[in-house]
Amino acid sequence: MLEAFFSSWVLPTLRVSTPLIFAALGGLWCERSGVVQIGLEGFMLVGAFFAAVATPYFSNPYLGLFIGGLAGMILSLLYGVTVLKLRANQIVSGTAINLFALGIPPFLSKIWFDSTGSTPPIPSESQFHSAPLVIMVFTVVGSALIYHYSKIGMRLRFAGEHPKALESAGVSVSWKRWQGVMMSGFLSGIAGGTLSTYLSSSFTRNMSAGRGFIALAAVILGKWKPIPTVLACILFGLTEQLQIRLQGVVLWGVEPVPVQWIQILPYLITLLVLAFAVGRSFAPKGLGQIE
């Protein structure tokens, strides 16, 4: 019974939560450094595309996943230039990044594969089976340790909470925020890579399907702390697994619930949770303030 529960619910929930956890941890580090990050969706899309292209090319899913992370980080550098150097509005810039990332993969896919809908399928021998789960666990543990017990984590938190105090200690606030932005891009690119090489076998248009925004909601629900944020991701992953299980189920002896209603379940629960929890969450004091 316990083994059946683990294989039917626990493992699938952790599986669908994996990209959310990577993206949420990236968003956490960025926002903890004092930079608003709503571009997670765009970083995930770019990471998913380049991971799906690189994995069959090198016949190595680990290298493909790493390249997906690099692609997300490169796009995050563009975001960093706009908000940290040019001091553009962070919400508008993040939205622009998301829109930009919607168009780049289909454009490159058309040039390389003569298709704007999807990339060629990844051979089964080059797909992940369980490794991203292990990588995710190490990433969570590492993030928690760095956040609570390292000088790097402390300085990143001070960049978002008390930037003037950090500057007076001789530490560059700007550099710490650059680090937060790049970490968000890399981890979100990894998150996208898990979508195309782990949860799927190719890249399809807009395959992130709002997961970047759900990851940001998990950061807010987790009050900008690693472990609560991961638990929030698992909660949202459970709702996604629930909507998969409910499709086609007949309730109360009547017609099955329309699949469209079931598919909105993760987003509806996200809205409801945020509506009740956001009032008790306090963002870093310096979030969005670039001097």
Image: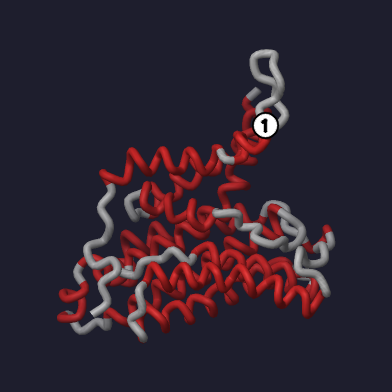
Image spot of residue 112 (x, y percent): 79, 78
Q: Quadrant of the C terminus?
A: bottom left
**Quick one: 34 or 110, which is closer to the camera?**
110
Q: Quadrant of the N terminus?
A: top right
Residue at image coords 36%, 66%: 36
Left or right, residue 219 beside residue 254 = left
Residue at x-position 57% and y-position 64%: 44
Q: For the image shown, how many numbered marks are present on the structure?
A: 1
Q: Position of residue 221 (x, y in %)?
A: 37, 47
Image coordinates for residue 62, horizontal then vertical, percent = 68, 68
Residue located at (20% from left, 80% from top)? 167
Residue identified by numbered label 1: 258
Q: Quick check: can you spot residue 121?
A: yes
**Quarter assignment of residue 19:** bottom right
Disc 1 is placed on an element classified as loop
Amino acid carrying label 1: it is: Pro
Q: Residue at x 31, y 62 (%)?
A: 149
Q: Position of residue 31 (x, y in %)?
A: 35, 64
Tell me: 258 left or right of 231. Answer: right
Q: Does residue 138 appear anywhere in the picture?
A: no
Q: Classify residue 119 as left or right of residue 291.
A: right
Query: 132 left or right of 165?
Result: right
